[in-house]
Image (cartoon, helix red, strand yellow):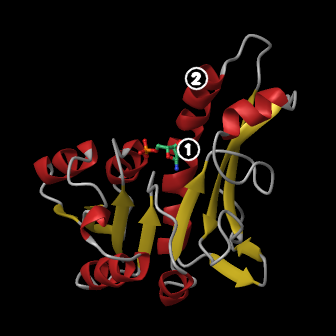
């Protein structure tokens, strides 16, 4: 199965997926919306095709998304993985990849969609925090949930220390979610995702 991974920065989640060397998964390309994304060099060093589309070079969000989709489709992906990709996507773009695009969000959705999730969890006095891999739909951070990972919040946690704990969990659940997709074990039923064969 061909996988295209989209990043905006360091791409640590992309790196975790590449390093998992998932059987049956071929990382066809890593694409960034910023030419200086550090993850591009990391991927290129490993012989993975890379591309950068500077969103500032496009007149509208629609123009950027159309160019991005053309670049992605050149690699004929079975799955598109948003990994630290900090762009809001148009409904047309999300519809084009319906059922075959993942995102990872650093909270236990549906709690804390949007930004600054760790500070918000701390401010709310949460005892648990975590990350969620979900199918991408037109509604930001609200697609069907594929995988979640949880961490305990310590009394002395800050947004930074909590982010670091959650990031480690992200690097576990994202490769697992991609493996389930590649193995054809995910069934979408409305808002719910069933993982056939247990969640091993
Ligand atoms: C992570 O916290 C992820 O949850 C969010 O972007 C952050 C950076 O991810 N989507 P990465 O290191 O670029 O993969």
Q: Where in the figure is residue 83, as x and y percent of width and height?
A: 44, 55
Q: Quadrant where the N terminus lies?
A: bottom left
**Residue 141 shown left or right of residue 97 in the figure:** right
Label 2: state its secondary structure: helix
Q: Residue furthest top?
A: 156
Q: Where in the figure is residue 5, as x and y percent of width and height?
A: 36, 63
Q: Residues within 10 Å of mark 1 (few under 14, many from 20)?
A: many
First reached walking from the N terminus: tag 2 or tag 1: 2
Q: Is residue 83 above or below residue 182?
A: above
Q: Which mark is residue 153?
A: none
Question: What residue is rendered at 54% in x and 62% in y?
Answer: 103
**Residue 108 shown left or right of residue 89 in the figure:** right
Mark 2 → mark 1, Cα distance in angstroms: 15 Å
Q: Residue furthest front?
A: 59
Q: Where in the figure is residue 147, as x and y percent of width and height?
A: 67, 57
* Marks 2 and 1 in Cβ contact (< 8 Å): no
Question: What residue is rendered at 40% in x and 53% in y?
Answer: 17
- Please identify, in this view, whether the residue under mark 2 or under mark 1 is nearer the observer: 2
**Residue 149 shown left or right of residue 54 in the figure:** right
Q: Nearer the viewer, residue 34 or 24?
A: 34
Q: Where in the figure is residue 97, as x and y percent of width and height?
A: 49, 84
Q: Residues within 10 Å of mark 2 (few under 14, many from 20)?
A: few
Q: Which residue is mark 1?
A: 170
**Residue 127 shown left or right of residue 8 in the figure:** right
Q: Can residue 21 be spotted in the picture?
A: yes
What is the quadrant of residue 78 in the picture? bottom left
Label 1: state its secondary structure: helix
Q: Which mark is residue 160?
A: 2
Question: What residue is rendered at 37% in x and 51% in y?
Answer: 14
Question: Assess mark 1: CB under 8 A from ligand 1?
Answer: yes
Q: Can residue 183 be spotted in the picture?
A: no
């Amino acid at each position: 199965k061909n996988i295209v991974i989209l990043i905006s920065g360091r791409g640590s989640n992309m790196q975790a997926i590449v390093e998992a060397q998932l059987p049956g998964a071929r990382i066809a390309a890593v694409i960034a919306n910023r030419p200086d994304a550090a993850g591009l060099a990391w991927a290129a060093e490993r012989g993975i095709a890379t591309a950068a589309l500077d969103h500032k070079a496009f007149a509208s969000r629609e123009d950027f998304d159309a160019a991005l989709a053309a670049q992605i489709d050149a690699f004929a992906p079975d799955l598109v993985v948003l990994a630290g990709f900090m762009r809001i996507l148009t409904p047309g773009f999300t519809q084009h990849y319906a059922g075959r695009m993942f995102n990872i969000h650093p909270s236990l959705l549906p709690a804390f969609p949007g930004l600054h999730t760790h500070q918000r969890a701390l401010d709310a006095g949460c005892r648990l925090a975590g990350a969620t891999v979900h199918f991408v739909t037109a509604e930001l951070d609200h697609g069907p949930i594929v995988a979640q990972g949880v961490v305990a919040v310590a009394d002395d946690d800050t947004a930074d220390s909590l982010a670091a704990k959650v990031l480690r969990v992200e690097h576990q659940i994202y490769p697992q979610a991609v493996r389930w997709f590649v193995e054809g074990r995910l069934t979408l039923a409305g808002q719910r995702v069933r993982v056939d064969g247990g969640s091993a």
